[in-house]
Amino acid sequence: MAYQGTPPPPYQGGPPPYQGGPPPYQGPQGPYSGVPASQYSDWIHRVGSYLIDWVPYAVIVFIGAITGSNAIYYLFLLIALGFWFYNRCILAGQGQSLGKKVIGTRLLSEETGQPIGTLNAFLRDLCHFIDAVICYVGFLFPLWDAKRQTLADKIMKTVVIPV
């Protein structure tokens, strides 16, 4: 059967029209270019959510440590590692870890404005090593950075915003 409608116009160059779904990629700055610093989560809220994320992990490890048994300690360490992965990778990859949910912030891609996914959340947590290795100065970057990003955020192109 032959095509009966009018043919589409010839290609004119430029991007195709927006068809729905997630917002289109908007260049290297993304949807958060030119946004005032007040639209990003401040340092104290970021610290609060980070501490809330790590307290359950520390409690689980502490309970395992005071038992006096190596086998139980390693079991609790494994449970703590599972909690860390679930909270800091899976939940954070979906936009809100436990701490971010309690404090009221969200972790998003700077380029797309969408949650970053489990793998990128894991890589972002690994990049926090760079924040720590330079005398923890990387964690202080949100105090003076225009987008209130840590070095890990800059590397992974993420932002933390209030909900």
Image: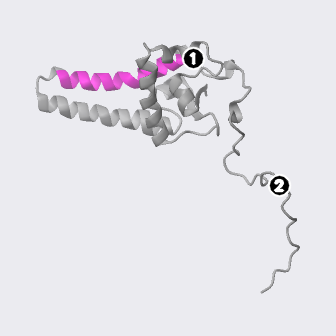
Q: Looking at the magenta stretch, what is its main secondary structure?
A: helix
Position of residue 157 measured from the top left corner of the image (x, y, whole percent): 58, 32
Residue 52 lies in the magenta stretch? yes
User: Of 7 and 113, which appears nearest the observer?
Assistant: 7
Q: Quadrant of the N terminus?
A: bottom right
The outermost residue toward the left is: 69
Q: In which quarter of the image is the C terminus?
A: top right
- How packed is label 1: few (under 14 Cα within 10 Å), some, or many (20 or more)? many
Position of residue 27 measured from the top left corner of the image (x, y, whole percent): 71, 39
Three-letter code, disc 2 = Gly
Q: Determine contact: label 1, label 2, CB under 8 Å.
A: no
Query: Mark 2 highlights which residue?
Result: 13
Sequence-wise, the earlier of marks 1 and 2 is 2
Q: Residue at x 14, y 23 (%)?
A: 67
Residue 23, quarter of the rendered image: top right
Nearer mark to the viewer, of 1 and 2: 2
Q: Which residue is drawn at 51% across and 33% down?
A: 96
Residue 37 lies in the magenta stretch? no
Q: Which residue is drawn at 12% across and 28% down?
A: 70
Q: Which residue is drawn at 11% across and 27% down?
A: 69
- Residue 104 vs residue 68: left or right? right
User: Of 17 and 52, which appears nearest the observer?
Assistant: 17
Q: Vertical placement of 5 versus 11: above or below?
A: below
Query: Which range of residues does the magenta coloring cover?
Result: 45-65
Q: Which mark is residue 128?
A: none
Query: Mark 1 highlights which residue?
Result: 142
